[in-house]
Structures are given as structure tokens and as C-alpha cells.
Amino acid sequence: MKVPKEINTYCPRCKKHTVHTISLYKKGKERGTAWGVRRHEEEKKGYGGQKYPEQKRTAKTTKKQLLKFKCKDCGYTLQRHGIRLRKVEIAA
């Protein structure tokens, strides 16, 4: 699906409709030293196996794409879930 690069939509900070630039949300790098990761590694060691079952295959073939809207006036960013689809293309 093609999405426009800019769109006119409501900005809650400006409290009016302004031009927003659209970008796709990308997940940041996970920290290997985070407490949850370290705890999970500890629980996987030795006998007893996994804490929760390892997922062999996923049921869904698509994800809901998260779109980031950045206001051109104030720079406020709001995130909205897009619809479920395989590929999002931000068109000029």
C-alpha cells in the first residue's frame, strides 16, 4: 500500500489541523544487558528447559504497520497503527 509523504491531520498540541510528515516506526536495538534478558538466560540454563514455549511457527503472515506522524509546526510526534498489510511504501 502506498502512503503519502505528507498529510494534513489534527495535531493535539497545536489543537488544529496541520501538515504532518509520515514515517514508518522501526524497533530499536535490544539491550543484551537488560534485567529481563539476563533473567531469561539464567532460567534457560541447566535442566527444566524454557520458561515459556519456543514458538515454532507464527500464525499471522503480516503485521500492523505503525506510522509516525510528525507535525511540521511544533514537531510533536504521534503514532497510529496502520492496517494489517505486508508492505507499506511511503510515496513522494
Image: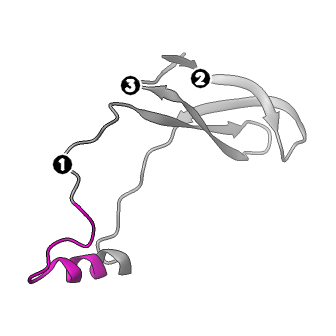
Q: Mark 3: which secondary structure? A: loop
Q: Could you say which is closer to the camera, residue 2 or residue 49?
A: 49
Q: Position of residue 83 (x, y in %)?
A: 54, 28
**For marks 3 and 1 on the same chain, the one whose residue lies earlier in the sequence:** 1
Colour convention of the picture: one colour
List x then y, in percent, for residue 71: 73, 38
Task: Tell me what residue is drawn at x 49 percent, y 34 percent.
Answer: 65
**Looking at this rendering, what residue extends furthest in the left direction?**
47
Q: Amino acid at mark 2?
A: Lys
First-in-chain label (2 vs 1): 2
Quarter-of-image position of residue 82: top right
Q: Residues within 10 Å of mark 2 (few under 14, many from 20)?
A: some
Identify the amino acid type marked 1: Lys
50 left or right of 59 in image: left
Element type at mark 2: loop
What residue would you read off at disc 3? Answer: 86
What distance separates the C-alpha of mark 2 from that of mark 3? 19 Å
Is residue 90 positioned above or below 55 on the image? above
The vertical placement of 73 against 48, above or below, is above
User: Local crowd at mark 1 within 10 Å, few (<14), some, or many (≥20)?
Assistant: few
Q: Give, as a single range, the part of the protein colored magenta.
A: 38-53
Q: Residue at x 30, y 82 (%)?
A: 39
User: Disc 2 vs disc 1: which is toward the camera?
Assistant: 1
- Count residues near mark 3 (Cα–Cα under 10 Å), then give few for <14, some for 14-19, many for 20+: few
Q: Which residue is mark 1?
A: 56
- Disc 2: which residue: 5
